[in-house]
Image: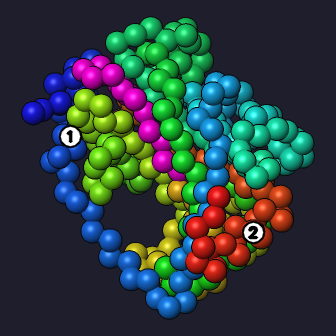
């Protein structure tokens, strides 16, 4: 059975090529090439941050364009810190509320997914239709927030207010995206194209964050140099330090046969490779210490 036809409707409507879609059962099974050593931090720490039931949405990006309302030119979905917008500061984030358990005030956000055959609430607004992002915003069905350790060493604490980016919102131009799409029931297969999922299967988006910190800075001019990805074998470059590795997974219940697309910059034409996410660590120091201890002692904590 094939479920690609609805996705082809999306491709044609958006002026995209057929290569932007793929049947999930045609995606190869991923092969894990990282070998865990005896020094690994094998624990995990999971937080319940809800699924944005309060519908915290805006077209801001406080990590990349702080102080500029609508600076993202597309709409972001949030869990965690309830006060996050373009004008947020370290002080305002620390004083805000949160949707996360354990008192985690961190902010986690990513572009919304839309059903493109419906009219959205923001058809003429910035971040929505005014920037080419038409359609009805599809709320997440589930959001998981998990921190894991390093496969080759213990981890050290992240500094509070550390900024992090994964993926590239300009990936259709730069070719440097890290988008990962899949379907429930096929979690061993990931692609950078829109997946064709079976009826009843959720569309999955996974965001893997960099985890090698420079030991000094919470941000950098391009917002990436202070926190980088480890080598394929899991080792951090000399002069950087392994910190807890954040993995966000967002599940979306796309009705069978309905076309969908992720929000993007207008010039990126809603390319699936542009999927990305941002994180600001606003955990209290005691909670971060608890996360580090959990990972380094090999426990599964929540």
Foreground disc of the pair 2, 1: 2
Q: Which residue is mark 2?
A: 290
**In the image: residue 151, left or right of residue 154:** left
Label annotation for residue 141: none
**In the image: residue 293, left or right of residue 234:** right
Mark 1, secondary structure of its residue: strand
From the image, which quarter does the N terminus lie in?
top left
**In the image: residue 173, left or right of residue 159:** left
**In the image: residue 60, left or right of residue 36:** right
Q: Which residue is mark 1?
A: 22
Magenta segment = 248-263
Mark closer to the chain start, 2 or 1: 1
Q: Look at the picture and state if 48 lies above or below 69.
A: below
Residue drawn at x 79%, y 34% as measured from the top left: 83
Query: Is residue 181 or residue 264 the one in the foreground?
Result: 181
Residue 257, horizontal then vertical, whole percent = 24, 20
Residue drawn at x 38%, y 49% as measured from the top left: 180
From the image, which quarter does the C terminus lie in?
bottom right
Residue 267 seen: no
Residue drawn at x 39%, y 19% as measured from the top left: 115
Query: Is residue 218 or residue 285 the one in the foreground?
Result: 285
Residue 112, horizontal then vertical, whole percent = 51, 30
Reply yes or no: does residue 258 show up in magenta. yes
For the residues labelled 2 and 1, the Cα–Cα distance comes to 41 Å
Residue at the left extreme of this rendering:
1
Residue 177, horizontal then vertical, whole percent = 41, 51
């Amino acid at each position: 059975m094939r479920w690609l036809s609805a996705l082809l409707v999306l491709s044609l409507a958006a002026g995209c090529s057929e290569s932007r879609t793929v049947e999930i059962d045609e995606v190869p099974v991923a092969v894990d090439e990282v070998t865990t050593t005896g020094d690994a931090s094998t624990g995990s720490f999971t937080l319940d941050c809800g699924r944005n039931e309060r519908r915290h949405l805006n077209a801001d990006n406080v990590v990349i364009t702080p102080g500029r309302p609508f600076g993202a030119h597309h709409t972001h979905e949030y869990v965690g810190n309830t006060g996050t917008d373009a004008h947020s500061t370290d002080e305002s984030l620390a004083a805000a509320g949160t949707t996360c358990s354990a008192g985690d005030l961190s902010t986690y956000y990513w572009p919304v997914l839309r059903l493109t055959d419906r009219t959205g609430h923001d058809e003429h607004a910035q971040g929505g239709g005014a920037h080419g992002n038409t359609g009805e915003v599809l709320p997440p069905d589930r959001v998981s927030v998990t921190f894991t350790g390093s496969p080759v060493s213990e981890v050290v604490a992240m500094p509070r207010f550390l900024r992090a980016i994964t993926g590239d919102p300009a990936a259709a131009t730069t070719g440097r995206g890290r988008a990962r799409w899949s379907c429930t029931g096929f979690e061993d297969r990931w692609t950078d194209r829109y997946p064709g999922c079976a009826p009843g299967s959720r569309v999955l988006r996974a965001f893997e964050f960099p985890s090698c910190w420079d030991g000094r800075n919470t941000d950098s001019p391009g917002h990436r140099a202070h926190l980088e990805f480890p080598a394929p074998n899991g080792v951090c470059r000399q002069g950087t330090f392994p910190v807890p590795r954040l993995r966000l997974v967002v599940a979306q219940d796309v009705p069978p046969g309905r076309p969908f697309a992720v929000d993007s910059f207008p010039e990126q034409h809603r390319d699936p490779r542009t999927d990305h996410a941002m994180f600001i660590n606003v955990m209290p120091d005691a909670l971060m210490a608890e996360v580090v201890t959990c990972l380094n002692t090999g426990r599964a904590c929540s």
